Amino acid sequence: EALGENLDGKKESEEDQSKSCKQKEESRLKLAKLLRCGTELVTNIQVATDIREIHRRVEEEEIKRQRLEKLENEVKTSQDKFDEITMKWKEGKQKRIPQDLWDMLRAQQVHCAGLIEDKNKLISELQQELRTKDDQYVKDLKKQSDDICLLLERMEEQVKSVMKTFRQELHHIEKAYEVERQELLAGNKKKWEQALQAHNAKELECLMNRIEKVEDYGKQLDRQRIRDCEEYNTIKVKLEQDVQILDQQLQKMKATYQLNQEKLEYNLQVLKKRDEESTVIKSQQKRKIN
């Protein structure tokens, strides 16, 4: 029975414990989900920034490749034009007519001006690209600043949300423990009352058994007392009769003793008298002999 009570108590304890464990597990899962969502919400900014940075680097690499290709083409084209101009100077040294020299000089000026114009155009494009990069750098800084502000804002909101949820779940857990505590107290109180009632019933049963035994023992003592009284009376009567018989025998013995004593005294007197007579006879015989 005690083993059954222990098993029942153990099952109830496991059920009560499962309630608090269930609440803790639910709170843990909820907080884990909240933290995961908050982390994703915060890391989304970083992911977006990383993706944007990857795209920027890809575009930068492409622009750098195009710029290098353009510079290589420009160098090649300029070198070809420069070589052509140089060849023209060599050809000009062979000219002797002023008009031809003038025409050649005009053509060389045009070629040199075209070469310089190409260089200036390339420089302007590079400067424009540099200004564009500066503007893009300022925009990127502003975007990063905005992202940082948004990140801080989301982090602050996440901290507030987590703290609020933590407090709520802590309240729920405390409430679950309080409910469990009240249930345990009520269950233990009920068990105690049942155990006390069983103990009182058992004590009452023991008391009734003891009273019955006492009454039974009292009856047995009464019967034994009656038997002892009867036996005592019987023994008393028998002893009184034995005393009377012994007294009669004593009186008879006393009479016999008295009679025997008188006989002995008589015999003693007879013996004394005979002794005296024997002594007288012996004296007479001694005198006769003398």
Image (spheres, rainbow, N blue to C red):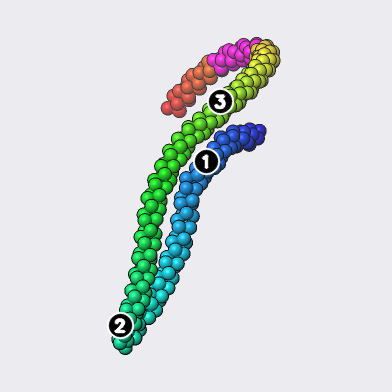
Q: Which residue is depicted at the point 34% across and 75% down?
A: 106
State the residue lying farthest toward the bottom.
Answer: 94
The dot on residue 34 is 1
Residue on which disc 2 sits: 98
Mark 3 packing: few (<14 Cα in 10 Å), some, or many (20+)? few
- Residue 199 is at least partly visible in this image: no
- Residue 102 is at least partly visible in this image: yes
The dot on residue 182 is 3
- Left or right for 69, reference 241: left
Q: Which residue is depicted at the point 38% across and 77% down?
A: 81
Q: Which residue is depicted at the point 40% across and 72% down?
A: 74
Q: Nearer the viewer, mark 2 or mark 3?
A: 2
Mark 1 and mark 3: Cα distance apart in space? 31 Å
Q: Nearer the viewer, residue 139 or 275?
A: 139
Quarter of the picture containing the C terminus is top left
Secondary structure at badge 2 equals helix
Q: Nearer the viewer, residue 29 or 145?
A: 145
Q: Upstream in the sequence, badge 2 or badge 3?
A: 2
Query: Looking at the magenta stretch, what is its main secondary structure?
Result: helix
- Left or right for 225, reference 157: right
Q: Upstream in the sequence, badge 2 or badge 1?
A: 1
Q: Nearer the viewer, mark 2 or mark 1?
A: 2
Is 231 rendered above or below residue 118?
above
Q: Which residues are magenta?
A: 240-267
Q: Position of residue 164 (x, y in %)?
A: 48, 33
Mark 2 and mark 1: Cα distance apart in space? 91 Å
Mark 1 packing: few (<14 Cα in 10 Å), some, or many (20+)? some
Amino acid on which disc 1 is placed: Leu
Secondary structure at badge 3 equals helix
Q: Position of residue 215 (x, y in %)?
A: 67, 15
Secondary structure at badge 1 equals helix
